[in-house]
Image: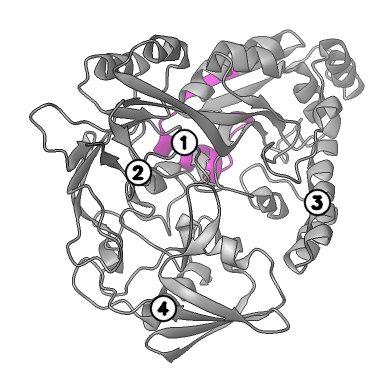
Amino acid sequence: MPHFTRLFAPVAVLLCASAAQAQDSITVAIQLEPPNLDPTGGAAQAIDSVLYANVFEGLTRFDADGAIIPSLAQDWTISEDGTVYSFNIAGGVTFHDGTTMDAEDVKFSLDRARAADSTNAQKGLFAGITDITVNTPLNVQITLDQPNGNFLFNLAWGDAVIVAPESIADIASNPVGTGPFRFTDWVQGDRITLTRYDKYWGDTPALETATFRFIADPTAAFAAVMAEDVDAFVGFPAPENLPQFQADPRFQVLVGNTEGETILSINNKMPPFNDMRVRQAVALAVDRQAIIDGAMFGLGTPIGTHFAPHHPDYVDLLPNSPFDPARAKALLAEAGFADGFTTTLKLPPPSYARRGGEIIAAQLRAVGIETEITNLEWAQWIEEVFTNKDFGLSIVSHTEPMDIGIYANPDYYFQYDSPAFQAVMEELNATTDPAGRSDLLVKAQTIISDDYVNGYLFELAVATVAKADLQGLWVNQPTAAVDLTGVSWSE
């Protein structure tokens, strides 16, 4: 959810290592349980939280600093016209069921992702592929209809990991990948256990076992960390408690960036939100800083468009939607809603949504918009909001990197249909010149801000509370993942 973008269910990760526990074993609990374990067919961000880089790998991957680095593809060449990529696949790679991973599996995975009946949440990543040819068992050639400056970036997403036809039927409950950890067990409602894969083709991780557990309640999360029942909590859901941990020498507190644009999603096709004046009124009724302070205790960076502020091409469009309740009321009156109206506000489980929803409801009420709040579990949110588009307003954080392209899909859940924006994104995909791409990204950010597609709130921060002797955790989240491949205990 948006995996969809993959939508952020802020990941709370517990890494548990009691005194009796071996230093090569930790327990990792996340705040939200994945609805299934197929990153190539499900939209929930929690899927990648557990599986990205740990169980599944793609041709490329995101490094801790956000760089795109080789993964299953050791290297590649690109044709002079930018449309043909030839990937050399690492040798000696096996899936966790013992079958060989080769170029045929790459072709199978990408053909499956781009197929007409694909349920991949990010099919747009593969839209430009016209042909996939297996040249040798360790070389695959991918042809595009036009140059795409984002192609290696696209292949690093969790939606583009490599899977095998032998195990695909059960991937949602028994994922089989090529990563350093293999899936061992899933006790639904409680935990997922991963075990080091001894035949892993790459560097051996320090950890032998890792158990992800699901702890949704912020109070329970605080108690678990304070009692040292857990080793770390990534995406700690109660930021008001961070000062207490910072003052305690038993812990380290890491605060980093995510790619999560937290938005007040608006159903652009549902009346009255099909009137831009109403969408603008919603945007002007929202006090971002009050939400950041009240729901996130100051953690978060205000945004005026769907783009990460730490990206060099970010444009500060906050002046386009300042907090201005008087102007919001005037716009509603112009649109024929001087007496306001009532709509739905459907909230997924994350703290930013539940806490922020109450604050936004009060702000909207002040300009005449009443909201009927419904708290949904993640699977319900996916079905009602993301899939069926049965909502007026919602709050969600889109955590996949550089995902502004979702606005070019008129069938995406907020149903924005702009030929002008679509043309900009089409040109962007065909542009490789850095300066040209920067200009187009500025245009794209400005269009969706000027159209008030959604209420742009803040870029989600990620706070990690960990035991002092745990090392290798990501500080920032360049993608929505809890990468355990470099995690270890200090000597």
Q: Secondary structure at mark 2?
A: loop
Q: Residue at x 11, y 38 (%)?
A: 22
Query: In the figure, is residue 434 to the left or right of 189?
Result: right
Q: Residue furthest front?
A: 491
The magenta stretch spans which residues?
Answer: 372-395
Query: Badge 1 is on which residue?
Result: 475
Report if residue 1 is visible in the image: no
* Nearer to me, 230 or 338: 230
Q: CA distance from mark 3 to mark 2?
A: 32 Å
Q: Secondary structure at mark 1?
A: loop
Query: Badge 4 is on which residue?
Result: 89
* Numbered mark located on residue 418 in the image: 3
Contact between labelled residues 3 and 1, with CB atoms less than 8 Å apart: no
Q: CA distance from mark 4 to mark 1?
A: 30 Å
Q: Callout 3 environment at 10 Å: few (<14), some (14 to 19), or many (20+)?
A: some
Which color scheme is applied? Answer: one colour
**Where does the image place residue 311, in percent across and percent down from the top left?**
69, 43
User: In which quarter of the view is residue 426 placed?
Assistant: bottom right
* Numbered mark located on residue 35 in the image: 2
Q: Nearer the viewer, mark 4 or mark 1?
A: 1
Q: CA distance from mark 2 to mark 4?
A: 31 Å
* Nearer to me, 42 or 68: 68
User: In which quarter of the view is residue 26 placed?
Assistant: top left
Query: In the figure, is residue 30 to the left or right of 200?
Result: right
**Where does the image place residue 41, in percent across and percent down from the top left?**
43, 57
Q: Nearer the viewer, mark 4 or mark 3?
A: 4
